Image (tube, grey):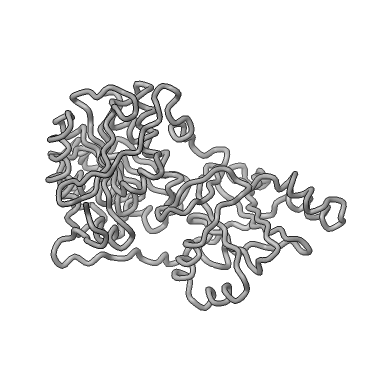
Amino acid sequence: MSAPGTPRVTAGAVPRTPPVVPSAPTPVEARSAVLAGALDRLGRRAQTVENFWATTGHRSPIVEPDPGDATRRIVTFLWRDADADHVYIGINKVTHGLDQGAMTRVPGTDIWYRTVALDARWRGSYGLVPLDDATWRALLEEGTRPALRRLRARYRPDPRNPLTESAHTGETLSVARLDRAPEQPWIRTSHNGDAPAPTTPEPVEGPGARTLWVVPPADYGLPHHPQAPVLLVLDGAVWLRRRHVTDTVAAQAAAGLIRPPVIVYVDNGEPERRMAELSVDSGTAAELAGRIVPWVRDRHAVSADPADVVVVGQSLGGLTALKTAFDHPEVVGAAIAQSSSLWQENMLERARAAQPGRPRLWIEVGLAESILLDDHRRLHRELRDRGAAEVVGYTEFVGGHDSACWRGGIGDGLLALLGGR
């Protein structure tokens, strides 16, 4: 199996780091009427802290209409900690620095809060970190990017919020969903009661000692058709742990909405190795098309049609998914590319060289992803205006660089690319 720290990159390739956001947007400040009323009662001692926590504060975040804008909601996040000197809340692509994520302590209590105004279609993950004063001052001196990196490693989920998601590195984050955010039915309903829960597969050694996990349709309770599609999932260890892809595929296939694919989870390792493996300069796209797909076909009865081979990836994985589909459409004929790292390579030249209708692409990006949004729009225009490839779906969702959003988009992409054929 692949050894950690053994990147497969072309000679001379140097993994690049993301650019710094030149001017991160400031969260829209807001005032919670619900919280203000509760705080007034707390101040007059007509309502105790325990009563507040059992009633108004029983669920976090508190969501209220914005009286000045029907498209927004006033969102208040809560935390309770008597020992902390500071509490930081990291909200994906909403708080970008220590000042923006600093929570306020209610005077005379152990309750902390942070209120912002958000689009009613927003969904996002967040984590909280209680800190002592010395650590807070050290973070202020350290600089924004390293400070936020340290804070992310210490995120805790919100105990008043049952909705969660796992971070790429395994930590549990909380998820907030506002009332107009798109549904994610395949995440919530899992198997619709029509198929057993998929078992977790054992890792296998693929070509070039690459670690793979293979889930054929039989593993999620459905017959394996000899013309089964192939679904290649980058960052395979992460998505296997989350289970969203296997659960979504099982539910959609059991409902007769897609043809049951053979799912191949592709390991890309920990952050440093992943950065090299999924860089646009790496050889991973060639490996997927030239070695992994033939390996799957040698071992499983699957379709020979390139249109039935779909690669799915996010961020650097999204970039690699696009590169694979553009460079090897004769093998990998479709891609689900979410929040692709187009700061490395905008893909416009590849788009101009693509054949009409080939490959078929499902592309998504978050409206809060300021580094990525303009490049995604340019790529979409290029593909649309030239008739190159086939953009089956292009979506700008209200959210950030966030698996809480991507997990639902994968299901949408699968319905578009593997349904109705």
Give the x, y percent position of residue 95: 53, 60
Give the x, y percent position of residue 378: 30, 50
Total marks drawn? 0
Quarter of the image with the C terminus is top left
- In the rendered structure, the answer to whether residue 345 lies left or right of residue 131 reads left
Residue at x 63% of width, y 62% of height:
103
Up-down: is 340 above or below 312?
below
Give the x, y percent position of residue 384: 27, 41
Which residue is more in the foreground, 51 or 29? Answer: 51
Which residue is more in the foreground, 69 or 165? Answer: 165
Q: Quadrant of residue 223?
A: top left
Up-down: is 121 above or below 198?
below
Q: Is residue 384 visible?
A: no
Give the x, y percent position of residue 100: 57, 64
Q: Is residue 198 visible?
A: yes
Residue at x 52% of width, y 45% of height:
164
Residue at x 57% of width, y 62% of height:
129
Residue extending farthest front: 202
Up-down: is 54 above or below 11?
above
Q: Quadrant of residue 27?
A: bottom right
Residue at x 37% of width, y 32% of height:
198
